[in-house]
Image: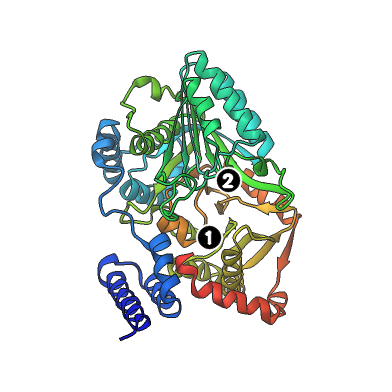
Amino acid sequence: MGIWSILLGIILFLNIALALAIIFLERKDASATWAWLMVLLFLPIAGFILYLIFGRRISGQRIFTWDTKMKLGVKFAVQEQLRALEDDTFQYKNSKLAEYKGLYYLHLRNDDAILTQDNSVNIYTDGREKFDAMIQDMEQAGDHIHLLYYILRHDRLGKRVADVLIRKAKQGVEVRVLYDDMGSRGISKKFIRRMRRAGVEIESFFPSTIPKINFKINYRNHRKLSIIDGKIGYIGGFNIGDEYLGDSKEFGYWRDTHLRICGDAVANMQTRFIMDWNQASRHDIVYDERYYAYGKNGDVGVQVVSSGPDSDWEQIKNGYIKMIMSAKEYVYIQTPYFIPDDSLQDALRIAALSGVDVKVMIPNKPDHPFVYWATLSYIGDLLKAGAEVYVYQKGFLHAKTIIVDGKIASVGTANIDVRSFRLNFEVNAFLYNQGLSERLLEAFVDDIAHSTQMTPKLYRERSIGVRFKESISRLISPIL
């Protein structure tokens, strides 16, 4: 038997073994299973390597445990709020909140997401305004600054943020920075050393053992959180990099949505940061009242909802579906990637076919080509159901926003795709307030003025080349 026959036999054996592991051990959903089996069938060697990089599941053990939540006082608060809702003794600051009891009860049970009612919220759709405000808040910090970002660059904006953090650390303020090792893979050791020498504690999430090479493509921390003195919190889509200021020649103006929150929801953002930090760092943060120094600042209801591959449930996706199914007038969505699974796509189709005004806005250019072509394939299904689709033309649309009936909304880090729902660690703010939802609606309407509508006629006139790209991308969309 020749060497090539032996190698072929080994490859065939490995492919069969891996296929059996995917089917019987990994317990992926059916669409992802079939997608990986197809890759293994048509790309025997490359498919095996791709699976090792992209396909492996995270450890079955939970990363963020109830033990940590108990130490932070979450478990008791969740049980108390659940009991009050079930007994109809919950005290509403705004009686209109009762209309969406099913949604926040879902998040409370599904994610231990405590409903808070005393918040004020500012909306930022421009990166310069968002970072000017955040840096100004950091300049005023007197106790601590906690930052968590998927992407941290050492460009002009990154250096500007680092300068403030270094200055505050030298003043005695506790400064902690957590960044994702994959998202921030271009960051230099010199940049990190400079902050550490000044007293800034900085850690990476799921780091690689080989510098600059990280094979853990999946299970990245895609969250973006800033907590300042336990009183102010930022959550949304902007990362720390010059392109988020609109300084990229490739993408142009960067349209995103970010929130500045003051109030008791900041405590939930703080807890999320502490849990992520304690997973990544050998120097755990322990409970201290000064980390929870929030005050009562308004009347906006907010739930901070997290999801990730360490959970059995897709909390943010379930929240999206619940919002869509509650819609009576309209559902407006902005997302850079639109690759819904069957459950979310069915919810949108049913809403549109039921007479609900469904509008989806996507960017006009890709930052990930396969994801972009898959997005175009899925919007065709919505057009058939009567939904309207808009393509943003002013620059790159990165906002992750859903608005329902001008009463509830969601803003955060989760895109509408499999990666956000199942593979990445995400965090969203679910908002219960008419005035705030109407402000988000105004921003959406303003963006329509900078968009072109993808009509059914235009969609049917797509070239054969575009249709081919869409078909291939859709076929592998469960593993994108």
Query: Can you give x and y, in whole percent of width and height, for residue 470 in the image?
Result: 59, 74
Asked which quadrant contains residue 317, the reply is: bottom left
Residue 261 in view, yes or no? no
Query: Can you give x and y, in whole percent of width and height, for residue 284 in the image?
Result: 32, 29
SS type, badge 2: helix
Q: Are marks 1 and 2 in contact (CB under 8 Å)?
A: no
**Which residue is identified by label 1?**
328
Identity of the residue drawn at 72% across and 65% down: 453
Q: Is residue 164 above or below residue 1?
A: above
The amino acid marked with disc number 2 is Ser
Query: Can you give x and y, in whole percent of width and height, for residue 363 in the image?
Result: 66, 58
Q: Is residue 390 above or below residue 136?
A: below
Query: Can you give x and y, in whole percent of width and height, for residue 256 in the image?
Result: 63, 46
Q: In this rendering, would 18 be left or right of 471?
A: left
Asked which quadrant contains residue 260, the reply is: top right
Count how many numbered circles sit on residues in the image: 2
Q: Is residue 92 above or below residue 229?
A: below
Mark 1 or mark 2, earlier in chain? 1
Residue 479 in view, yes or no? yes
* Distance in Å between CA atoms under marks 1 and 2: 15 Å
Q: Nearer the viewer, residue 68 or 444?
A: 68
SS type, badge 1: loop
**Which residue is identified by label 2?**
437
Q: Is residue 56 above or below residue 41?
A: above
Q: In this rendering, would 163 be left or right of 462?
A: left
Q: In which quadrant of the rendered image does the N terminus lie?
A: bottom left
Q: In this rendering, would 340 be left or right of 460?
A: left
Q: Colour scheme in the image?
A: rainbow
